[in-house]
């Protein structure tokens, strides 16, 4: 017995009822206005319970405002509702003597039992069309969560189809999503949650019910539902872990991930304890790219109630980081319900602190504490959030310069002395090294660890891979080691005299790295590597990390000399200085210029593809499609990990980030990895593509080669575009033979893995191997497009294959696989059918015809139950006989063409009879029984059909087919009409059943009808 989508739906409903205590209701049983998505009969009673002291007039006004949320886009309306949901609805009412203002709460967040929780399936909503989502979760009558399910047992449907269905719902029944908190999609194997603004990539699994990450590699479907919808946690998520981030060009609605939820709850508990003890709130370590900045926003918001309106001071160690984090908090100001402030100076910081007793989120940099002279504030209700808390300059102890005798006071000590009674919490994206005692002395131990391994498992970030090209520059190994050693001293030691000494030494070494011949070698190799291997990877975005500002300019100038046509493609992003040479200004501009450059680099479609940076953009700057970083700067520890994490963001089918090393950072990378947890060392201790991606590529290449045993495609390497086109379609034809079904399935899977591996190690692969991989990818593309869902065109296939051939064989011609036909496939185009029928690749012709006919059967499945069944049986019989070897290629093509011809004729049948599409469907239902054909003249049948259609249309109400009484009534109407026209008794039951089935089909697949 198959476990259907309906069975899965019932299991989820049972989980909500039995495990979570929700009340179940069947949508069609609830009498309501289908144009109103609210469960309105529940709302007012719930508001009366939640707001017992407010008069009825105030509650009714709240309901009125709820039902008529202003004009604007779905996102704008949903943003208003989200504010209502979290903070209440502002209303005015007359108390008998004067007008008063108050807030009406929609949910009682303090007492969960004061709220109603419903799980309802088949909740019909009518806007432009009628739609019926699988399950909707209601709280107090508000449809807060839409759940879309797909059958676990049907191969052709999956969670991606559920996502597409949700997006279609947002377009077709927009009113439902005005009140949406978030959505859930599940096919049993994969269950994810996301908001109305989230791409499919950003729907996330919820993998824990208790905050443990120990058993979260594979998330069971029930973990998401029990983890998110336990009543107390569900209300907590609604109140505290959903926010709008005001961004350009579009606002984003953000739902906290499971690791953010549990970590923030732990941090709040730790902070509260610290305020009454030693002031050490702990260290919050969530790896780069896992949403640390938003975790800080969620934490700051909830501190307001946890600690009764404290003042929050956010400290960063650089101006650009300060700006980035301040920008994130500012974009969430509505959620925070206060506007963050940025201290311009130490005096400004002092004024901002001394002029308030509570509240406030104040941003500042560490440098503003350098001028310490006295405490800025001695209040206890101050919480200091330190971003990147592991920095070595957070030293508590005093140090003495042995050369000058000058006392150096660590910045951490100055901050502590400036805010002596504050509570301190550290947020970091990289781990604290075992030797870093200072950080623990200041902040305490870890609150929560979300490491690289867990982040990659959750698809919150992607793995990072490494490629060494040091040899391309012919740099002396001793020089590289000396650079690394000196740079390490700066990175590890904050003592001024050591820093100055190292800078002098590095100044001499810079002349080697900045030598004209070295810069030329570097630029030539970067250009070759980029053009040959990386420019077609995703959006082609890449970053070059330069050793110094002057070297950044040298790299830019040399690349422009070598590639003058790259003027819009490459740019330099770094801070400007008053002492900069005049000729730099046109290139690096000012702060406004850098902001513009940031927008261009984040725009996937902008021509700016390569950014040369020194320090800017190496922390807190996210471009998800960025997949390549060229490193010409020694880095260590957290600096290195933060920098390379620029390429680990999730984006479409990106497989990971590639670091291309020109200064020998391999040792530093391994050392940095040693500071990670044992899990990370085990999983990511060796990111070298030569030992990871390349062996995987070679393995999959051999597998694909073996699967093609018996077909010679060797001429693909040397042939013309026409030769390649023939070999591609020939390869598809070879794998499409009915005896090769399992081989074809294996090839599609293995060739996709081959493409993934190649995307990371292309530079290590020989030309012959690239050509062979390109061939396999072209065959895979064509196979999956022909077998996939939806219509496709020759243009789409040719463009896609031509694009991938550019990456590997640098083809300039267009690979036309079949002909010059540019339009969509058309089943009713005789010339096109002739084109397919005359193809030499007979197996491929069968696949194309089967796809076209299957698509038309799907169309009939939405319009005509009789024709759908008839043509589905004809197609199934033909393909079954073909697969059993009872039909040859020629015979099955002939049968398929015959079915296509019959379908084409059926399209015109209704017009000849003067019937609409709907009338034709009921005509087919009435004429299905064999006894009917000899009983009536055709004119009589047409008259009966029109009368039947009119009666059904008048009596068809929304959800009628879901209600037994309504179904019975419709059957009686049909029987009464047929008896009136003396319809043959032996065909009566068959006709009634078919008519009712047809009526149900039209209700499900056409616009809504008045109730």
Image: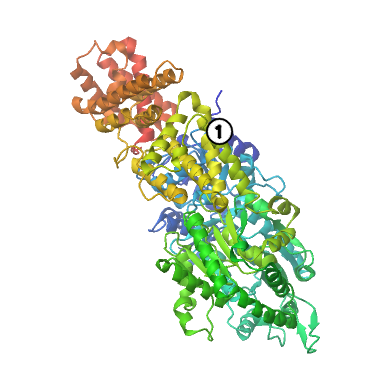
- Which image quarter: residue 916? top left
Q: Quick one: 79 or 56, which is closer to the camera?
A: 79
Give the left or right position of residue 378, taking residue 104 as reference.
Answer: right
- Which corner quadrant holds the N terminus? top right
- Residue at mark 1: 706
Q: Quick one: 789 or 946, which is closer to the camera?
A: 789
Image x and y of residue 278, in percent: 79, 70
Q: Considering only vertical position in the picture, is 22 above or below 895? A: below
How many residues crowd mark 1 within 10 Å: few (<14), some (14–19), many (20+)? few
Image x and y of residue 714, in percent: 47, 38
Render colour scheme: rainbow
Give the left or right position of residue 502, taking residue 403 as reference.
Answer: left
Q: Considering only vertical position in the picture, is 530 above or below 960? A: below
- Which corner quadrant holds the C terminus? top left
Image x and y of residue 643, in percent: 61, 65
| Residue 925 visible from this viewpoint | yes
Local SS, label 1? helix
């Amino acid at each position: 017995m198959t476990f259907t989508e309906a069975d899965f739906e019932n299991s989820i409903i049972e989980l909500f009822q039995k495990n979570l205590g929700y009340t179940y209701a069947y949508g069609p049983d609830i009498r309501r206005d289908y144009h109103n998505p609210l469960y309105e009969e529940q709302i007012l009673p719930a508001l009366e319970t939640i707001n017992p002291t407010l008069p009825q007039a105030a509650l009714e006004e709240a309901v009125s405002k709820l039902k008529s949320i202003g004009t604007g886009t779905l996102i704008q309306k949903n943003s208003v509702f989200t504010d209502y949901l979290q903070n209440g609805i502002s209303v005015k009412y007359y108390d008998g003597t004067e007008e008063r203002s108050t807030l009406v709460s929609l949910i009682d967040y303090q007492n969960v039992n004061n709220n109603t929780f419903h799980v309802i399936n088949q909740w019909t909503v009518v806007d432009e069309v009628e739609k019926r989502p699988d399950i909707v979760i209601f709280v107090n009558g508000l449809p807060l969560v839409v759940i879309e399910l797909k059958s676990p047992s049907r191969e052709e449907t999956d969670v991606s189809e559920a996502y597409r269905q949700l997006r279609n719902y947002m377009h077709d029944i927009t009113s439902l999503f005005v009140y949406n908190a978030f959505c859930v999609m599940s096919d049993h194997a994969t269950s994810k949650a996301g908001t109305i603004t989230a791409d499919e990539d950003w729907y996330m699994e919820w993998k824990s019910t208790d905050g443990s990450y120990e058993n979260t590699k594979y998330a069971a479907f029930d973990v998401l539902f029990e983890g998110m919808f336990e009543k107390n946690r569900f209300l907590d998520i609604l109140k505290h872990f959903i926010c709008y981030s005001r961004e350009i060009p579009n606002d984003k609605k953000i739902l906290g991930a499971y690791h953010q939820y549990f970590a923030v709850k732990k941090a709040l508990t730790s902070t509260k304890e610290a305020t009454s003890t030693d002031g050490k709130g702990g260290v919050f370590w969530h790896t780069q790219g896992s949403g640390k900045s938003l975790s800080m926003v969620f934490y700051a918001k909830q501190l307001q109630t946890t600690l009764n309106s404290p003042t929050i001071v956010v400290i960063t160690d650089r101006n650009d980081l300060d700006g980035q984090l301040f920008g994130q908090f500012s974009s969430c100001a509505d959620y925070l319900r206060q506007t963050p402030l940025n201290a311009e100076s130490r005096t400004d910081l002092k004024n901002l602190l001394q002029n308030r007793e509570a509240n406030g989120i104040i941003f500042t940099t560490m440098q503003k504490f350098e001028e310490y002279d006295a405490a800025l504030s001695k209040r206890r209700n101050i919480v200091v959030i330190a971003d990147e808390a592991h920095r070595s300059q957070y030293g508590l102890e005093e140090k003495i310069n042995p050369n000058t005798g000058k006392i150096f006071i660590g910045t951490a000590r100055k901050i502590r002395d400036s805010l002596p009674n504050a509570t301190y919490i550290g947020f970091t994206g990289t781990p604290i090294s075992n030797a870093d005692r200072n950080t623990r002395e200041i902040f305490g131990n870890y609150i929560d660890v979300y490491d690289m391994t867990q982040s990659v498992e959750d698809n919150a970030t992607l793995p990072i891979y490494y490629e060494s090209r040091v040899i391309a520059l012919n740099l002396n190994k001793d020089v590289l080691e000396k650079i690394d050693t000196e740079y390490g001293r700066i990175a590890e030691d904050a003592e001024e005299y050591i820093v100055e000494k190292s800078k002098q030494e590095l100044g001499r070494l810079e002349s080697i790295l900045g030598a004209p011949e070295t810069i030329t070698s570097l630029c030539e190799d970067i250009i070759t590597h980029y053009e040959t291997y990386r420019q077609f990877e995703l959006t082609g975005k890449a970053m070059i990390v330069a050793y110094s500002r002057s070297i950044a300019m040298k790299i830019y100038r040399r690349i422009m000399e070598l590639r003058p046509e790259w003027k819009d493609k490459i740019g330099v992003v770094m801070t400007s200085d008053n002492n900069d040479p005049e000729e730099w200004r046109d290139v690096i501009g000012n702060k406004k210029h850098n902001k513009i450059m940031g927008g261009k680099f984040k725009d996937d479609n902008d021509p700016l593809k390569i950014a040369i940076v020194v320090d800017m953009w190496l922390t807190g700057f996210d471009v998800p499609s960025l997949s390549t970083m060229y490193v010409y700067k020694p880095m260590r520890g957290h600096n290195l990990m933060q920098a390379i994490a620029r390429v680990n963001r999730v984006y479409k089918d990106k497989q990971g980030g590639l670091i291309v090393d020109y200064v020998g950072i391999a040792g530093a990378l391994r050392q940095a990895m040693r500071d990670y947890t044992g899990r990370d060392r085990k999983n990511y201790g060796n990111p070298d593509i030569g030992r990871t991606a390349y062996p995987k590529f070679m393995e999959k290449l051999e597998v694909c080669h073996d699967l093609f045993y018996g077909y010679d495609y060797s001429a693909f390497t040397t042939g013309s575009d026409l030769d390649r086109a023939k070999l591609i379609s020939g390869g598809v034809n070879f794998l499409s033979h009915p005896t090769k079904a399992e081989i074809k399935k294996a090839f599609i899977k293995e060739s996709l893995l081959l493409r993934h591996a190649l995307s990371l190690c292309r530079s290590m692969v020989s030309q012959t191997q690239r050509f062979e991989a390109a061939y396999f990818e072209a065959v895979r593309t064509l196979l999956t497009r022909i077998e996939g869902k939806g219509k496709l065109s020759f243009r789409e296939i040719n463009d896609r294959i031509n694009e991938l051939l550019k990456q590997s064989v640098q083809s300039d011609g267009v690979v036309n696989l079949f002909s010059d036909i540019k339009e969509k496939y058309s089943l009713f185009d005789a010339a096109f059918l002739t084109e397919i029928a005359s193809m030499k690749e007979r197996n491929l012709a069968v696949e194309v015809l089967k796809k076209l006919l299957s698509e038309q059967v799907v169309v009939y499945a939405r319009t005509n139950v009789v024709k759908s069944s008839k043509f589905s049986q004809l197609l199934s019989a033909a393909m079954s006989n073909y697969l059993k070897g009872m039909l040859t290629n020629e015979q099955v093509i002939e049968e398929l063409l015959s079915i296509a011809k019959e379908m084409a004729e059926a399209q015109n049948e209704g017009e000849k009879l003067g019937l609409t599409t709907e009338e034709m469907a009921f005509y087919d239902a009435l004429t299905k029984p064999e006894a009917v054909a000899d009983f009536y003249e055709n004119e009589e049948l047409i008259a009966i059909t029109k009368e039947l259609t009119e009666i059904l249309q008048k009596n068809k109400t929304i959800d009628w087919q879901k209600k037994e009484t309504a179904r019975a009534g419709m059957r009686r109407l049909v029987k009464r009409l047929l008896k009136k026209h003396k319809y043959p008794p032996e065909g009566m039951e068959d006709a009634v059943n078919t008519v009712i089935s047809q009526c149900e089909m039209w209700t499900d697949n056409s616009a809504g009808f008045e109730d």
